[in-house]
Amino acid sequence: MIRYGDEAWAELKFTKFAYKIEKRDNQWVDVYLTVETAEATPLPLDIIDFKIMVICTHEGHPIQLVTLDEDCDCEYQLTEWEKDQINAFIRSAEINEAIKTKASLVE
C-alpha cells in the first residue's frame, strides 16, 4: 500500500477475503472486502478498521477499488499487484455469481 504523498511503500499479500455484497442501484453493486494479510506483510499500524470497497457492474466486472478505514476514504492507495489480487478474487466464479445474483434481486 502507498500512503498518498509518500515515496516509501510496501505491497500486501492478501491471504483471506471476507465479503459483503450490496446492490446500490440499477447500475452498480458494491462489494465490501475485509482482508487478512500474510504475517510478513502487515497492514500499516495507523489503520484502525481497514476495508476495500469494490464497485462492480451488475455483470460482476470490478470498475473501481476504494480503500476505507473506519468506513471513510483512506489515505492509502493500492499497488497494482494488490489490485490484481483483489480483481482475481472478485472475478472468481463464486464471487462473480454472488454479485450477479445480488444484482438480479428486486429491492
Image: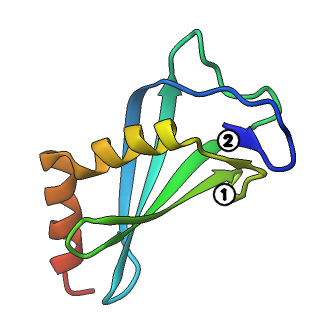
Give coordinates of residue 7: x percent, y percent: 83, 36
Give the residue displayed 76% in from the left and 37% down from the top.
47
Q: Secondary structure at mark 2?
A: loop
Residue under pointer 1: 71
- Residue sitting nearer the eye, 50 or 41: 41
- Mark 1 element type: loop
Circle nearer the N terminus (1, 2): 2
Q: What label does residue 54 carry, if any?
A: none
State the separation of the CA atoms marked 1 and 2.
8 Å
Image-based side of 16 in relation to 51, left or right: left
Residue at left 67%, top 41%?
49
> In the image, which disc is placed on residue 49?
2
Residue 87 percent location from the top left of the image: 35, 48
Toward the right, the furthest residue is 5
Looking at the rendering, in which quadrant would you find the C terminus? Answer: bottom left
Q: Residue at x 72, y 40 (%)?
A: 2
Nearest the eye: 79 or 95: 79
Residue 30 at what x, y percent from top left? 41, 67
Q: Residue furthest front?
A: 7
Crowding at dot 1, Cα within 10 Å, few <14 / some 14-19 / many 20+, comes out as few
